[in-house]
Amino acid sequence: MTTAETVEGYRPPEPEQISLLARLADVWTEFETRLAEVPILRALADGEVTVADYQRLLHNLRQQVVDGSLWIARAASNFDMDHFELRSAAISHALEEHRDHLLLERDYVAVGGSLEALRAGRKNIGSQALSGYMFHQASQPNPVGCLGAMFIIEGLGAQKAAAWAQQFQDVLGLADNQVHFMTYHQEADAEHTGKLDAILTSGAIDDEAADAIVSCARVVARLYAMQLTELDEI
């Protein structure tokens, strides 16, 4: 017990008194713990993945990647003029994201996958839950909470994707053109997270918005881990 906690009348700080980035950092730490238990990522870390595993991962990710720019665009359309800067940021982000699935498709074909089969794929149960939740969130008036989803998803690209790509290359002997989707996102998502952090620390985020952002981040972190766990489970 700290000295502060022994002082008579001490009360822990309310959530809104803790910085938003600190609260999101706690969500991220929990997310990393969940990711460490995902079977395919555990196999990757242990050097036991196969090319078929990598194909399965890309196949399952593609269905959610396609939806990403769509729910961001929907969120943009639901910001009013009082949230003009957030609307502009969402529009720009959707534009940058809407071709990402093409990078993934090229990687999938480069490791022997069928483009026709990939495009005919269905969302696994985690992807269904994630997309359903995000379209619901994005359809709300002024869906500021969606910034929490971006924190998780963009953070994944910026902090994890390149390392995963390198591990797949080391274990499977893959060429750069077979992991381009992941390596591309290290740089692109690092830029996105920088812009996102600027928004999260701006005066545009009040206490109510901060609570919505943290809540959305927490839900998305769990659903994303489910998506990676429930590969091919539809």
Image (cartoon, helix red, strand yellow):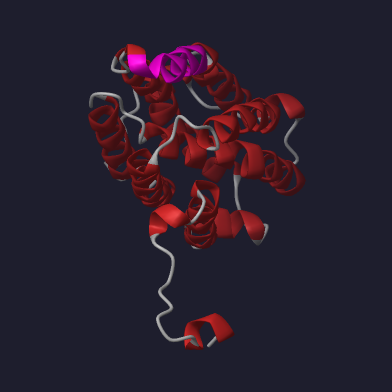
| Residue 17 in which image quadrant | bottom left
Q: Position of residue 140 (x, y in %)?
A: 23, 27
- Using the image as rendered, state which of residue 10 and residue 65 is in the foreground: 10
Q: Magenta segment: does it hold 90? A: yes
Q: Which residues are magenta?
A: 82-94
Q: Position of residue 230 (x, y in %)?
A: 36, 49
| Residue 210 in which image quadrant | top left
Q: Magenta segment: does it hold 76? A: no
Q: Residue at x 66, y 27 (%)?
A: 191
Tell me: 47 left or right of 133.
Answer: right
Q: Position of residue 188 (x, y in %)?
A: 65, 25
- Using the image as rendered, state which of residue 177 and residue 143 is in the foreground: 143
Q: Position of residue 12 (x, y in %)?
A: 43, 71
When the figure is inspected, residue 36 is found, relative to residue 101, above or below; the finding is: below
Q: Residue at x 54, y 48 (%)?
A: 21
Tell me: 196 left or right of 117.
Answer: right
Most common secondary structure along the magenta stretch = helix
